[in-house]
Image: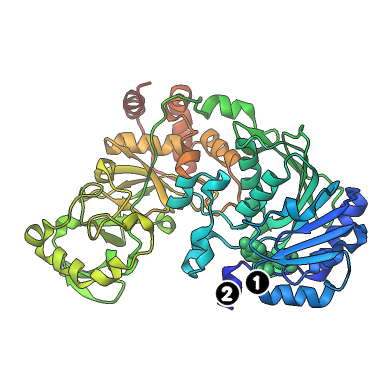
């Protein structure tokens, strides 16, 4: 089972395979001379595609057992070839010869790099995202923890960019959108694109937005894609269009952009992400009374207080001002890559605690810990020590911002699912929190993302908000009405808002 999960293995039910092929044949009038199934599994999609009466059918599949099963069921047909191999390294153009029009029909693996990494799939290491032009740094830091279907679809789009080919793929909706953004950034044109959503829970038992992505390659002209539901494939329900290289719902108001969007090259405030430690059992703590702390292993320990800070995680950001904190985090460094050896004499309790849990900390999988000083954290900088922060969770579609301020004056830390701006005082932070929770900013941010995205907000996306520009244009009255809408007692003064504007350089 682990092997199957690691390969993102959800075989297409025959009924869905037939529905997809009937749509392509009868609605899209696709008439291929060759059908390629890039990750053909046991061959359901390939078998359903026999309605096209193409001259050749080629299936590629990594798993030997599936190759055998596919051969048993359809391999006897003279026009069918099932090849065992990795689609990322197979030269399918050569295998297809001079086919005139190709239908690339598939259901590539529904698994992301993190899951695959956690499952220890060997192939994960060899997947060369960079060679396909996917942003390598994002891939390494997890900023884009993409599905393996993304490099597979991207490779096929690259291979067939100059052919008369239709690519029809079942995949997560978020992966389809990510592919369309990659095509744009790599200048791979397409003549038409349709995204037909279906119920993945019902058909595959997976809780995710899913679609059939149909892309007409080998021609130019499309500036986005049409949206349908697979069960009503002729009823257009919306469109996505490219705006500044990303996809947005068609008609997302340009007045919001004029008010909120940073212009390319303008210097917007750098959003920071929270701490990355990858060892919650050791590093995250709760109070155990009498100045002691309990860790995730159930141990109660004493630690030097200078190294323990209040911690806020995504699920804690529920109200607009947070002043009490139920979790804490051990922060053994003050800046990135600081050597921790001095703790032996400066903070012997912390040192002993870390040494006692050395094996768990050393077993952290992410490559960023390799070569870093022992017990290192990431996502650490001067900004981490700011006493006031305005933060949001990257995980929730509603962009709710909260001011974090510990009455005891300790800097509040965030985990790496959150993003924040440091603020110089409570008053400025409070005004900033209101500004960011104002309706135009909320609508603008929602217009940049999608409710089904795994992480709707990232540092990059937040960077598209020009906070200073918004502060220059929104009046104090708008912040006051936001304060009332959030159910806060009135406390914002014009002077506080002025202080925020001055700090932003407005
Ligand atoms: C989601 S399943 C779909 C199977 C089949 N396409 C279908 O529709 O029923 C994904 C398939 O991709 C195969 N696979 C995973 N990585 C692959 C690779 N790099 N090259 C070829 N096949 C691969 C898996 O073994 C699995 O059969």
> Tag 2: Cα neighbours inside 10 Å, few (<14), some, or many (≥20)?
few
Q: Is residue 277 left or right of residue 479?
A: left
Q: Is mark 2 within 8 Å of ligand 1?
A: no
In what quadrant of the picture does the N terminus appear? bottom right
Q: Is mark 1 within 8 Å of ligand 1?
A: yes
Does residue 155 sit above or below 296 in this rendering?
Answer: above
At a point 58% along the width and 57% down the height, the residue shown is 147
Expressed as whole percent of the image width and height from the top left, the position of residue 292 reads 18, 69
Which quadrant would residue 303 be assigned to in this image?
bottom left
Which quadrant would residue 95 be assigned to in this image?
bottom right
What residue is disc 2 on?
3
> In this view of the protein, can residue 370 be seen by the observer?
yes
Residue 63 badge: 1
Mark 1 falls on what kind of element?
loop
At a point 84% along the width and 72% down the height, the residue shown is 74
Mark 2 falls on what kind of element?
helix
> Tag 1: Cα neighbours inside 10 Å, few (<14), some, or many (≥20)?
some
Query: By what rule are the colours in the image chosen?
Result: rainbow
Dots 2 and 1: beta carbons under 8 Å? yes
Closer to the chain start, of discs 2 and 1, is 2
Choose between 77 and 199: the one closer to the eye.
77
Please name which of the two marks, 2 or 1, marks the residue nearer to the observer: 1
Q: CA distance from mark 2 to mark 1?
A: 10 Å
Does residue 451 sit above or below 465 in this rendering?
Answer: below
């Amino acid at each position: 089972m682990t092997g199957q999960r690691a390969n993102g293995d959800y075989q297409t039910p025959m009924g869905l395979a037939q529905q997809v092929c009937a749509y392509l044949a009868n609605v899209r009038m696709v008439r291929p001379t060759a059908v390629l199934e890039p990750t053909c599994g046991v061959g359901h999609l390939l078998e359903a595609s026999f309605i096209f009466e193409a001259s050749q059918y080629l299936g590629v599949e990594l798993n030997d057992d599936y190759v055998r099963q596919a051969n048993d069921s359809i391999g006897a047909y003279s026009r069918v070839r099932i090849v065992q191999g990795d689609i990322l390294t197979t030269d399918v153009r050569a295998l297809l010869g001079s086919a005139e029009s190709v239908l690339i029909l598939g259901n590539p693996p529904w698994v992301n790099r993190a899951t695959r990494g956690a499952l220890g799939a060997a192939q994960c290491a060899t997947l060369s995202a960079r060679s396909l032009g996917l942003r390598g740094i994002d891939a390494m830091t997890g900023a884009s923890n993409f599905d393996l279907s993304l490099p597979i679809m991207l490779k096929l789009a690259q291979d067939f960019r100059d052919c008369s080919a239709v690519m029809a793929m079942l995949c997560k909706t978020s992966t389809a959108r990510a592919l369309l953004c990659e095509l744009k950034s790599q200048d791979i044109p397409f003549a038409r694109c349709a995204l037909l959503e279906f119920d993945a829970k019902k058909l595959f038992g997976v809780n995710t937005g899913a679609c059939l992505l149909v892309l007409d390659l080998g021609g130019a002209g499309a500036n986005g894609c049409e949206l349908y539901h697979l069960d009503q494939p002729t009823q257009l329900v919306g469109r996505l269009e490219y705006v500044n290289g990303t996809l947005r719902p068609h008609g997302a108001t340009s007045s919001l952009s004029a008010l909120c969007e940073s212009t390319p090259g303008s210097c917007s405030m750098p959003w920071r992400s929270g701490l990355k430690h990858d060892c919650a059992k050791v590093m995250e703590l709760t109070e155990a009374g009498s100045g002691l702390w309990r860790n995730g292993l159930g141990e109660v320990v004493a630690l030097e207080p200078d190294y323990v800070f209040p911690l806020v995680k995504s699920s804690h950001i529920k109200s607009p001002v947070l002043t009490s904190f139920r979790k804490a985090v051990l922060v053994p460094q003050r800046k990135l890559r600081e050597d921790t050896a001095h703790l032996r004499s400066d903070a012997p309790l912390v040192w002993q605690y870390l040494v006692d849990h050395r094996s768990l900390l050393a077993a952290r999988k992410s490559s960023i810990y390799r070569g870093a000083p022992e017990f290192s954290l990431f996502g650490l900088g001067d900004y981490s020590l700011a006493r006031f922060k305005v933060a949001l969770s990257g995980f929730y579609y509603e962009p709710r911002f909260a001011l974090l301020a510990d009455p005891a004056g300790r800097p509040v830390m965030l985990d790496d699912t959150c993003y924040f701006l440091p603020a110089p005082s409570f008053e400025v932070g409070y005004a900033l929190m209101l500004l960011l929770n104002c309706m135009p900013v909320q609508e603008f941010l929602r217009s940049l993302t999608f409710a089904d995205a795994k992480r709707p907000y990232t540092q990059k996306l937040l960077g598209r908000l020009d906070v200073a520009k918004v502060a220059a244009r929104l009046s104090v009255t708008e912040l006051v009405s936001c304060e009332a809408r959030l159910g806060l007692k009135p406390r914002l003064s014009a002077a506080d808002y002025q202080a925020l504007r001055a700090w932003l350089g407005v």
